[in-house]
Image (cartoon, rainbow, N blue to C red):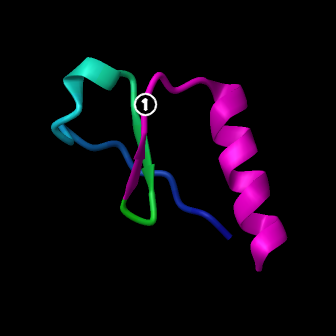
Amino acid sequence: MFSIEETRCVGACGLAPVFTVNGEVYGKATVQKLDQVLDELMKSK
């Protein structure tokens, strides 16, 4: 359902670590934050 890819800089060093989902950047990333974002996406489908 989801793919995870390692990337280089996304231009958000001040928010590092970051992840992006559908082009939206999420800063100060944690595993819990990623789980929350993915859960919300799954509920909206």
> In the rendered view, does 11 fall on the left or right side of 45?
left
Q: Quadrant of residue 22?
A: bottom left
Q: Which residues are magenta?
A: 24-45
Image quadrant containing the C terminus: bottom right
**Circle 1 is placed at which residue position?**
27
Residue pictured at 59% horizontal, 23% vertical? 30
Give the amino acid type for the residue marked by disc 1 in the picture: Gly
The image position of residue 32, as x and y in percent, is: 72, 28
- Magenta region includes residue 37: yes
Image quadrant containing the N terminus: bottom right
Q: Residue furthest bottom?
A: 45
* On screen, residue 12 above or below 3: above
Residue pictured at 27% horizontal, 43% vertical? 7
The image position of residue 8, as x and y in percent, is: 19, 38
Residue pictured at 78% horizontal, 67% vertical? 42
- Tell me the SS state at disc 1: loop
* On screen, residue 14 above or below 43: above
> In the rendered view, does 4 fall on the left or right side of 32?
left
The image position of residue 6, as x and y in percent, is: 35, 43
- Magenta region includes residue 34: yes
The image position of residue 35, as x and y in percent, is: 73, 41
Residue pictured at 25% horizontal, 19% vertical? 14
